[in-house]
Amino acid sequence: MNHLLVAPILLPMFTAALLLVLHRAPVVMARSVNAAATLSLFAASVAILTQVESGTPLVYQVGNWPPPFGIVLVADRLSAFLLLLTALLAPPVLLYAAQGWDARARYFHPLFLFQLMGLNGAFLAGDLFNLFVFFEILLIASYCLALQGLVVERLRATLHYAAINIAASSVFLMAVSLLYGITGTLNMAHLAERVALVRTEDVALVRVAGLLLLGVFSIKAALFPLYFWLPALYSNAPAPVAALFSMMTKVGVYAIIRITTLIYGAESGVLMELTSPWLLPIALITLVLGALSAFGAGRLATMTAYLTIASVGTILTAVSIGGAAAFSAGLYYLAHSTLVIALLFLIGDLIGRSRGDMSDQIHPGPQIGRAAGLGLAFLFAGTTVAGVPPLSGFLGKFMLLQSVNGAMAVVPVWTVILATSLLMLVGCARAGSIVLWNVTDPLPSDSAHAPRAGEWTALAALAACSLLLVLFAGPVKHYTDETAAQLLSPDSYIDAVLGPQREGLVRPLQTGGLR
Amino acid sequence: MMELMVAIGLGIVTACGLYLILRGRTFPVVLGLSLISYAVNLFILAMGRLVPEAPPIITEEAARYSDPIPQALVLTAIVISFGMTGFLMALAVRTWHQTGSDHVDGAEPKTVGRPAGTS
């Protein structure tokens, strides 16, 4: 058995535990241990990606218990893609945090690794219950990361965020156990087979479970009308944490893609495309509200938080259009938006730091130091996120617009995507020109707050990733195309988990109803 | 009969929890979330079918058995919800200390024709 698949979970877990033991050690040591672990995670993710590229998903049976009885970790193309994206985002964020902020933030390094463990585990989990468990791991780490410093605004935002997520977890458990009660399994591949076989009187219950799951994942992904926890949390969180959180909404997106393609996919008979009538309108409304709120935001961090919501809206528009081309465009856009939004959070923090009391408010204020460099960085990130050609946001949106051709939804999707792109562009231009050019006090502020070399490097790394997405758009598009094809024919996933000869392995369907 | 009673009981506990999490103070919210998690734990157990006086293992003698998987799931769910509730409680107390208000928004609401503390 290939033990590589368990590395993205165990490596951060053990390193985080080690760092907890060593938390009194000098911060340089914590940094280097964390950096070593994060870079090894990157290597492991690349290795997993190259292995799944053949088309056969990797399956790891924990404790060697055969599925559907034991716990399985599964990496198909989608999981490997998201693992690599997480591993790509983590090193620049860590580098940015390691420029002095981490010395003041208690337990930042172990919490950072626990967050990575939760993210990786959620992408690899092969059954719904472990998806729940890894969600909880990433949530508890994110609560503590968002609370760093215990400032009043962070306490308030985290209280709301924790309360809504604990409620969501209860609903998640209800949906999972409902599915178990009807189908007798939690393994997602096995569920995919079983939901097609449920008796007609149980179909309504399976639909309820599916829509409950959609509701829970919409909270995690921050979809309208369940995104109200996000702006306060992301805009008040420390910048490196907010940058890492740009991956967190994508876990909700991943879970929505997974259940809609695998469990409620094309082969589930009467349950086919259960969520599709809901998803497209919700995604479009999310996109419009995100772009409008970003346009009217009062702070750079708030603007970026709303841009996160808009990006989730865009990705789920692609997912709800369906079809290989739209999925592929959505995945490309997912990679682009995660990296660029992280970049925007970091730039906003650097700008805010050098403006003294004005912080990152979008309001005329003092001249910032290093205005040229930060201004160019903001110009790059703003135009990329809005989708100006030839940057990565443009390519993602272009593929999305192309994929919708011929579908019924072509008019609303084109209108909304193009109008919101304009809104985002004007919003970023407004924010940039007010903050960088509308200077009330022309004296440059002191250089103590000027960005350090490491912070420039972190920005450059994220910007480079976005540019590489453009330069290597061909190979990336090829990979996302193949991923979309694999998602739309889940047989290879099911075969990899349950094995080709799976008759007799599974116990008969329970007779339904409470005895 | 047992099923009906369990179902009604779960409904009442969930409704009480739902009412409490919609309150304006943090302590009722924490209580409401714990009530809902109790209801969910019982719901998971019920989804393994309510089989009294049957072992959770298959043996030669046992004519019937109760499903052991929901029991394992409940164990995990209890641990997680216990931890999360504890964390939320600590967070609520800390917010109260820091803001001087136990309102969920971290500040007393603007009283419009209502005395304070009756949210």
Image (tube, coloured by chain):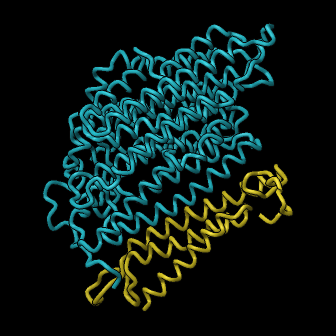
- On the picture, is B73 further left or further right than A47? right
Identify the residue at horizontal 68%, vertical 46% (top origin): A157
The spot of residue A511 in percent (x, y) is 25, 79
Q: In which quarter of the image is the C terminus of chain B?
A: bottom right
Identify the residue at horizontal 58%, vertical 77% (top origin): B13
Q: Looking at the colours in the rendered structure, which chain would you say is drawn in cyan?
A: A
| Picture colour for chain B | yellow
- On the picture, is A193 further left or further right than A367? left
Q: Measured along the vertical axis of the image, is residue A64 above or below residue B45?
A: above
The spot of residue B32 in percent (x, y) is 64, 68
Q: How many labels does the image show?
A: 0
Q: In this orientation, does residue A120 appear?
A: no
Hey, which quadrant is residue B91 in on the image? bottom right
Identify the residue at horizontal 57%, vertical 25% (top origin): A344
Q: In which quarter of the image is the N terminus of chain B?
A: bottom left
The spot of residue A48 in percent (x, y) is 32, 36
Q: Measured along the vertical axis of the image, is residue A341 above or below residue A165?
A: above
